[in-house]
Image (cartoon, coloured by chain):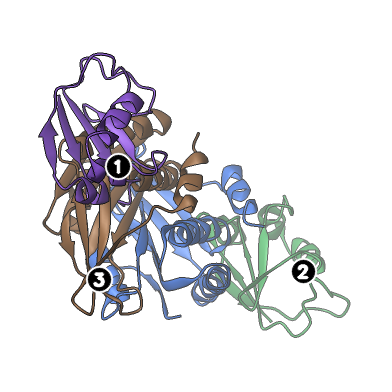
Chain colours: A blue, B green, C brown, D purple
């Protein structure tokens, strides 16, 4: 199955990515698109800064993608993860999963997100409204637990 | 052997990467961390809670017990917070 | 919470609907968009024809939406369901669920689809490649089981 | 009382809707179906497997035992296949 993985600073276009997945085919019955956005945390943040490990980020997402492809009968899978400075309201991550039926598409997209959160080498730090650089975002135990349900 | 650091591990060590000559007898990632902690307080600080810092060898996640034999690049970083 | 429900013959624009949900706000962290598409079933179909019960379709989707809003902390919910003749590759249904975090968005979108499949008064019939009108699509037991997991 | 039919129930009955005067003693949806089946073979055919046909009173799904008292519009249709 064809998949697309991109790590980039630029915004992405969900509609264009979806069109790439579905072009010239009529066997896809379900597409789940997950978009992760930067929140302002009640006005506290002016931006999130995303650091990543170039080379490993692509390799790790590729491995996660291969696992998803083995587990579900997917007809398309796209992952785009941004890095750099991202303002509230802007997109951070996109996962698109396409399949003949909805269950595979929902599960694969959810699986991809749980693994991206806990396995892909990205780190977020907060930039605060008062102009200072805030803390690195701490990993959440809930994310580890979410990943464990796929074991 | 190249070492690379990310996020607050990078900030605490005070550099993004470095080339090191690892002495004989340093067989695992855990051995390497212990050796690094002997090199200065910045490493001591970065690895003060060894259970938290994660490692990857040549772009693959590894556990502390993993062998570093043949590794080209070893990375240390906090738990990931992407997605 | 504001929600949008539309029953229409016309195609929809996922990007425009998403932009409507997110406009002027920075508290949304996760958007799950489910798009259901018409498959050609291995080249057997030239179209699906969707019949619906006007009035009840809106009312029933409104009730399902209210249930989802009670169950999950949603920041936006959009449901668009088409009727009429739909060709392979075209969209049939869209569910957009927005929340601060991904679990609520994934679960709410999945819940909405399971309920739409089994509770919303729509019926599909096949139009075959040989020019004849085929059978009404039969309800699947798997869809009833999928709904039961939310009970 | 208005009756409306959808999908293959509509095709079998041969009409999209009709106004009926329901006689005394027809209290539930199941009673109504039994009465309709006595009106002609097209109804007999549409409701030949009563367990399959679904009903709604005034746009709300109901079970066969539901009372039809006060209903303005009763709909009969196959299991739904939207989404």
Which element type, helix, strand or loop, lies under badge 1? helix
The chain to which mark 1 is attached is D
Image coords of residue A86 (percent x, y): 32, 56
> Label 2, on which residue?
B29
Tags 1 and 2 both on a single chain: no
Q: Are marks 1 and 2 in contact (CB under 8 Å)?
A: no
Which element type, helix, strand or loop, lies under badge 3? loop
Left or right, D34 with reference to C132: right
Which label sits on residue D44?
Answer: 1
Taking the image as drawn, is residue A43 in sight?
no
Image coords of residue B39 (percent x, y): 75, 65
From the viewer's side, name the closer residue of A125 and D62.
Answer: D62
Residue C133 sits in quarter: bottom left
Which label sits on residue C89?
Answer: 3
Task: Please state which of the two labelled residues, at mark 1 or mark 2, is closer to the viewer.
Answer: 1
From the viewer's side, name the closer residue of D65 and B49.
Answer: D65
User: How busy is the neighbourhood of tag 1: few (under 14 within 10 Å), some, or many (20 plus)?
Assistant: some
Task: Please state which of the two labelled residues, at mark 2 or mark 3, is closer to the viewer.
Answer: 3
Task: Please state which of the two labelled residues, at mark 3 or mark 1, is closer to the viewer.
Answer: 1
């Amino acid at each position: 199955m064809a998949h697309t993985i991109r790590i980039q600073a630029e915004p992405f276009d969900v509609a264009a990515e979806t069109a790439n997945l579905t072009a010239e085919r009529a066997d896809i019955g379900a597409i789940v698109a997950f978009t992760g956005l930067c929140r302002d945390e009640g006005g506290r943040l002016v931006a999130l800064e995303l650091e990543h490990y170039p080379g490993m980020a692509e390799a790790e997402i590729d491995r996660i993608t291969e696992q998803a492809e083995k587990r579900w009968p997917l007809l398309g899978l796209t992952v785009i993860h941004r890095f750099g400075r991202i303002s509230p309201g802007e997109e951070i991550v996109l996962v698109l999963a396409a399949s003949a039926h909805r269950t595979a598409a929902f599960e694969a997209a959810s699986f991809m997100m749980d693994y991206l959160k806990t396995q892909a080498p990205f780190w977020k730090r907060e930039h605060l409204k008062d102009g200072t650089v805030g803390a690195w975002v701490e990993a959440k135990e809930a994310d580890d637990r979410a990943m464990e349900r796929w074991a | 052997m190249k070492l690379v650091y990310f996020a607050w591990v990078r900030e605490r060590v005070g550099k993004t990467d470095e080339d090191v000559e690892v002495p004989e007898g340093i067989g695992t990632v855990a051995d390497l961390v212990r050796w690094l902690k002997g090199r200065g307080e910045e490493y001591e600080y970065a690895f003060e809670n060894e259970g938290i810092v994660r490692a990857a060898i040549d772009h693959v996640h590894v556990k502390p017990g993993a062998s570093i034999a043949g590794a080209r690049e070893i990375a240390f970083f906090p738990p990931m917070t992407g997605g």
